[in-house]
Amino acid sequence: MEKCCNLQTNSYLCKMYDPLLIANFFIDKALEEEIPLTHMKLQKLIYFAHGANYVSGDEPLLNETIEAWEYGPVVDGLYHKLKKYGNEPIRELQEINGEISNPCDDLDDRTIAILESVWNSLKRFTAIQLSSASHVEGSPWHRTKYEKCGGRLRMSQDIEEDFIKDFFRSRFSNGAIAVAP
């Protein structure tokens, strides 16, 4: 994929991806490195990748919104495709449009680098630790729960993209993703 430089911000405009493709990237990494990857942990990795994408880009990583659920940020469509795994590790790549392919074949180099960085930074954390990290005061999830919902989350409550963009740009401006659960 050709990258287009935004001369005003010196950042790249990127393609938005199906969350299942991003999920397959992390599933592939987990299988390759023999690291158990539950559905909940996968949801949090995707959330952090979506935020990390904003550190150097102006467009969302995902072509679906992220919602604020009780245990943190969730992509609803992905949840319904993967809920069958419950708390068990996901042990196979998922079909996209009836096919299973190498996720790197469909991702641009910039996106792969972001996903690699997120994976390498966060793979050692549990789903609960990543969920806790997504709940810190001032986080997009926290702002959604307390500023938009008065402390009570409703189902299908989208997290505003500006909340995600502002949070990740202010916390991770050097490009490194670090979580202290």
Image (cartoon, grey):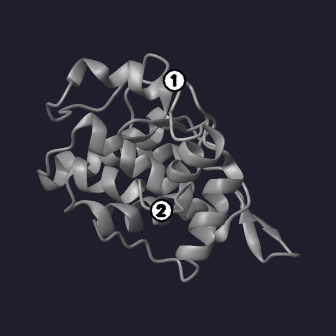
Image x and y of residue 72, in percent: 40, 43
Outermost residue toward the bottom in this view: 174
Residue found at the far front of this picture: 150
**Displayed quadrant of residue 100:** top left
Q: Label 1 belongs to which residue?
A: 155
Which amino acid type is shown beneath numbered disc 2?
Glu
- Residue 124 visible, this orientation: yes
Residue 140 image offset from top left, x and y in percent: 56, 53
Mark 1 crowdedness (10 Å alpha carbons): few <14, some 14-19, many ≥20: few
Question: Between 169 and 111, which is closer to the camera in this rendering?
Answer: 169
For residue 66, which numbered disc appears in the image? Answer: none
Q: Residues within 10 Å of mark 2 (few under 14, many from 20)?
A: few
Residue at the image position 32 percent from the left and 43 percent from the top? 42
* Residue at mark 1 to residue at mark 2: CA–CA distance: 21 Å
Can residue 1 be seen from the camera position used here?
no
Question: Which element is circle 2 on?
Answer: loop
Q: Is residue 112 above or below residue 78?
A: below
Image quadrant in which the C terminus is located: bottom left
Amino acid tagged 1 = Met
Mark 1 or mark 2: which is in front? Answer: 2
Residue holding disc 2? 137
Tell me: residue 119, above or below residue 67: below
To which quarter of the image does residue 163 belong? bottom right
Question: Earlier along the polypeptide chain: callout 1 or callout 2?
Answer: 2
Q: Locate residue 59 relative to residue 123 in the image: left or right.
A: right
Query: Which of the two residues, 7 or 151, is positioned nearer the viewer here?
Result: 151
Name which residue lies at 18% across and 45% down: 31
